[in-house]
Image: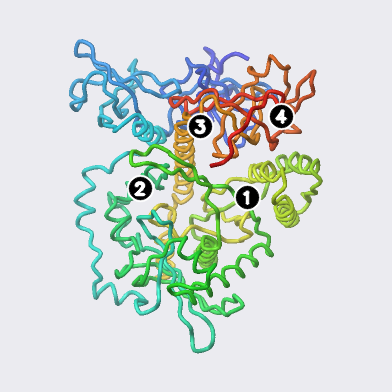
């Protein structure tokens, strides 16, 4: 098909303009992804206009395209930039300066006027901001924001990962005065507006290396034999007010980013680690849900509102786990009671259709320079599940409360956290694959799907196929997102759900707090841009997750460099026409075995239904979930890529075991 350019003399009725997101491949070809369209629109490099990879664009395409035909289009406008700051190198020659982006995606060089260099010198690694790219400009014009100062190559890599994902490394200097004037002093005026919970036993439970504590639990016995349990969340909305510069910065970031050796916070340290952190032996402003609960985990009463608390102790997960296992230690009776209730809440969730997915989380052990010296697989134990259940209960309770409030018989705009039901097209091949291992998945009814999944997940425990079926099962599920359209959370089995419990690191939680207070005050301000804000927060969350994956991959490659030429046991974690991925058993580090390195043995074809590569002559099969032996042959830090080679059984040498 010819390019989607409007021919001379053609009427406007022959073309249409649609909006979508531009994805540029490494080869330089572009594709615009339009919501609701089966096929992407092909964009040739000369038709990108002023758009960059990831931008939301308006693209012109012909009308009345035959079904199944490839569509080509031309970008006519950029509706929204994915990012305006980029990492690259500065080149200065005879007082003419250009910024050369370091992105793998094709981006033109920026012209930098002399007055916009901001002290940067030729050859330095810099962050540049796009200033303008007008219609008649051959090149985009930019300015140098900062020179990247890095301790070493790894530090530079982490900073570039953040910047490429659109997260600034520092907070703007103009923000400092606004933050400095904030005070955490408990005032008499504010005390009159809040429930005072300072005389109730309260504590936090967090990872050992946590610096901000945004949730706490209180507990006390009531005269009627029930228990009063409070879930108290840092009142970030008290300090971050709508329309403030601080609020605009927090919204733009929308989330904190957690890389292996650092945190890039949503809020400045004074707020996240001081004013809003529920540190022990300090009075703090909180937003709370307080429950009256029986010993059978029946909720008899709920109270929602702003509070003041005083944390009596800061527990780590390890300390609480030891208390649960030994039934002894500081505040062991309330901790054991909370754990018993949490287990009952957990059982109720699964009985009501929640899916018991568990994923392996890997944590790097780093030396003082940030270099990985070990890898630990984190287990989710009872202490983690205790906190999880009470946070889920609070989130669900808030969403249920707000969902019942109407304006002119319409639900109020609110950032729900939703999870759609599984897609039949993804479920069917997974059910067929599971059947090959002897597991039956009922995909004809939504509730039966959840029950079948849970039975499968329980039955595969300890079996060779456990890893592959768990991973594929997770991939069949839709991704959870923020939206004002409340369709419930399928994975959790909740009709109503939102994020209320982590406002220090998630902007949607801040929005929830504000709307919640408006509901309590009966002073609702309808936000007509709620859906737009939800989409922004979902997009930022996805960017943060991609950055976190990139950071983890970098550390994996950095760690595996020491094992070049050595053999390890691994599990095939994915397959494609060009090879298969293997995750080492010892380190959970994933690398690619290229099909090119298998040519000497056989020609291989992808069997999509069986998630396998199959040898055409030998019938040797590399199927997802199979255990094989690999050799580490390359560890490329720049590409964040590990290359493995299959070690044939006949030539297998002694493999390394987990250390």
List the residue tagged with mark 2: 265
451 w.r.t. 250: above or below: below
Q: Which is more N-terminal, label 2 or label 3? A: 3
Q: Depth-wise, is mark 3 or mark 2 nearer the camera?
A: 2
Q: Depth-wise, is mark 1 or mark 2 nearer the camera?
A: 2
Residue 622: image tag? 4
In space, the residues marked 4 and 2 are separated at their CA atoms by: 42 Å
Q: Which residue shows up at 26% across the image and 27% down it?
A: 143
168 w.r.t. 646: above or below: below
In space, the residues marked 4 and 1 are separated at their CA atoms by: 32 Å
Say whether residue 405 is visible: no
In space, the residues marked 1 and 3 are separated at their CA atoms by: 22 Å
Q: Secondary structure at mark 2?
A: loop
Q: Which is more N-terminal, label 2 or label 4? A: 2
List the residue tagged with mark 1: 420
Q: Residues within 10 Å of mark 4 (few under 14, many from 20)?
A: many
72 w.r.t. 420: above or below: above
- Judging depth in this view, the residue of 234 and 48 nearest the camera is 234
Q: Secondary structure at mark 1?
A: loop
Q: Depth-wise, is mark 4 or mark 1 nearer the camera?
A: 4
Q: Which is more N-terminal, label 2 or label 1? A: 2
Q: Which residue shows up at 65% across the image and 67% down it?
A: 348
**Are dots 1 and 3 in contact, CB under 8 Å?**
no
């Amino acid at each position: 098909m010819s390019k989607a350019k409007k021919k001379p003399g053609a009427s406007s009725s022959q073309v249409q303009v649609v909006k979508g997101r531009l994805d540029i491949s490494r080869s330089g070809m572009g594709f615009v992804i339009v919501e609701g369209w089966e096929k992407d629109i092909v964009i040739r490099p000369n038709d990108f206009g002023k758009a960059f990879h990831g931008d939301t664009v308006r693209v012109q395409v012909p009308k009345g395209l035959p079904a199944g035909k490839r569509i080509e289009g031309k970008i006519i406008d950029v509706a929204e930039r994915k990012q305006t700051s980029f990492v690259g190198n500065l080149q200065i020659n005879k007082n003419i300066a250009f910024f050369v982006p370091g992105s793998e995606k094709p981006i033109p060089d920026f012209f930098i006027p002399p007055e916009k260099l901001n002290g940067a010198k030729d050859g330095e690694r810099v962050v540049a901001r796009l200033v303008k790219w007008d219609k008649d400009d051959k090149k985009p014009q930019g300015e140098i924001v900062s020179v990247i100062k890095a301790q070493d190559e790894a530090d530079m890599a982490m900073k570039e990962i953040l910047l490429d994902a659109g997260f600034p490394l520092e907070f703007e200097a103009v923000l400092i005065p606004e933050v400095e004037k904030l005070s955490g002093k408990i005032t008499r005026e504010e005390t009159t507006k809040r429930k005072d919970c300072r005389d109730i036993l309260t504590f936090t439970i967090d990872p050992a290396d946590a610096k901000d504590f945004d949730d706490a639990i209180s507990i006390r016995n009531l005269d009627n034999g029930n228990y009063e349990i409070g879930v108290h969340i840092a009142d970030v909305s008290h300090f971050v007010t709508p329309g403030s510069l601080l609020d605009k910065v927090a919204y733009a970031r929308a989330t904190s980013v957690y890389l292996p050796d650092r945190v890039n916070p949503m809020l400045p340290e004074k707020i996240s680690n001081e004013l809003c952190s529920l540190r022990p032996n300090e009075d703090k402003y909180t937003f709370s849900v307080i429950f009256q609960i029986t010993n059978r985990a029946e909720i008899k009463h709920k109270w929602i509102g702003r509070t003041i608390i005083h944390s009596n102790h800061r527990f780590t997960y390890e300390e609480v786990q030891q208390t649960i296992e030994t039934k002894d230690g500081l505040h062991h009776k309330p901790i054991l009671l909370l754990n018993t209730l949490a287990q009952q809440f957990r059982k109720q969730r699964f009985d009501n259709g929640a899916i018991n997915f568990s994923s392996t989380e890997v944590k790097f052990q780093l030396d003082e320079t940030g270099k990985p010296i070990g890898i630990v697989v984190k287990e989710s134990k009872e202490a983690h599940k205790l906190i999880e259940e009470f946070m889920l209960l609070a989130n669900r309770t808030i969403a249920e409360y707000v969902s019942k409030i109407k304006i002119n018989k319409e639900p109020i705009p609110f950032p729900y956290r939703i999870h759609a039901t599984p897609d039949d097209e993804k479920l069917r091949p997974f059910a067929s694959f599971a059947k090959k291992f002897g597991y039956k998945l009922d995909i004809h009814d939504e509730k039966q799907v959840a029950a079948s999944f849970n039975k499968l997940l329980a039955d595969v425990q300890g079996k060779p196929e456990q890893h592959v079926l768990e991973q594929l099962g997770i991939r069949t599920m839709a991704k959870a997102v923020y939206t004002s359209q409340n369709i419930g959370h399928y994975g959790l089995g909740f009709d109503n759900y939102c994020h209320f419990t982590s406002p220090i690191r998630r902007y949607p939680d801040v929005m929830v707090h504000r709307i919640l207070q408006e509901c309590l005050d009966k002073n609702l301000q309808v936000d007509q841009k709620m859906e737009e804000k939800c989409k922004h927060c979902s997009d930022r969350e996805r960017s943060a997750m991609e950055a976190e994956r990139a950071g983890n991959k970098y550390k994996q490659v950095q760690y595996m460099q020491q094992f070049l030429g050595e053999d390890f046991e691994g599990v095939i974690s994915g397959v494609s026409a060009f090879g298969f991925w293997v995750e080492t058993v010892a380190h959970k580090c994933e690398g690619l075995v290229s099909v090119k390195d298998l040519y000497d043995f056989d020609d291989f074809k992808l069997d999509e239904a069986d998630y396998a590569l199959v040898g055409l002559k030998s019938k040797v099969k590399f199927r997802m979930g199979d255990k094989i032996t690999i050799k580490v042959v390359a560890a490329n830090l720049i590409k964040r890529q590990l290359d493995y080679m299959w070690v044939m059984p006949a030539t297998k040498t002694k493999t390394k075991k987990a250390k």
